[in-house]
Image (cartoon, helix red, strand yellow):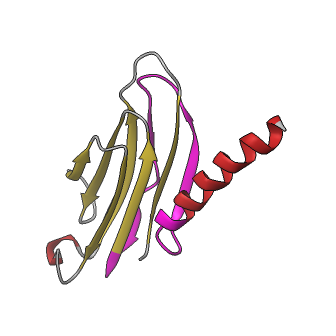
Amino acid sequence: MKASKLLIPAAALLLVLLASNPAGADCFSGQLSPDANVCRDFLYSTTTICASGNSYQPRFKILWTAGGQPYTTILNTTQTSFSQRYDTTSNPTYFPGFFQLCIHNLDTVNWNNFQICIGPC
């Protein structure tokens, strides 16, 4: 009976995470230690980019560069969940360009589960 109680919340979380992932995105999940950072590699795009993330007490950042340094922070949020799209129509100055998604655990005591995704829309 205990196993079935655990499966229902786990299945519900999986459905939420799958629904929030951009199609074809590079996703990464795990546990983030207190006050730690994780970043995905820079992703090059000429047309669109979608990013999403879920965690408790996070700081999500999306960094952008046209092809070198300096990097510009184009998203900086502490929401527990976010989804963002950039495209050539709405943000033409970002394309072509390199995008990187990072998460920082703002909790200085607890490990927190997280998922981050970045990729084509």
Please provide the residue range marked out in magenta. Answer: 19-48
Name above or below for residue 63 compared with residue 59: below
The residue nearer to you, when weighing 97 against 32, is 32
Query: Residue 4: x, y in percent?
Result: 79, 44
Answer whether residue 90 is visible to the viewer in this image: yes
At 39% from the left edge and 41% from the top edge, which residue is drawn? 103
Name above or below for residue 1 compared with residue 84: above
Residue 8 shown left or right of residue 52 in the figure? right
Residue 40 shown left or right of residue 74 in the figure? right
At 21% from the left edge and 70% from the top edge, which residue is drawn? 94
Hey, which residue is sitting farthest top in the picture?
109
Q: Quadrant of residue 14?
A: bottom right
At 57% from the left edge and 47% from the top edge, which residue is drawn? 29
The magenta stretch spans residue 30: yes
The residue nearer to you, when weighing 55 against 86, is 55
Hey, which residue is sitting farthest front in the picture?
1
Query: Residue 6: x, y in percent?
Result: 73, 41
Answer whether residue 71 is visible to the viewer in this image: no
The residue nearer to you, when weighing 76 against 41, is 76
At 41% from the left edge and 64% from the top edge, which residue is drawn? 43
Query: Residue 21: x, y in percent?
Result: 49, 65
Which quarter of the figure is the N terminus placed in? Answer: top right
Which quarter of the figure is the C terminus placed in? Answer: bottom left
The magenta stretch spans residue 25: yes
Query: Residue 119: x, y in percent?
Result: 45, 68
Q: Quadrant of residue 64?
A: bottom left
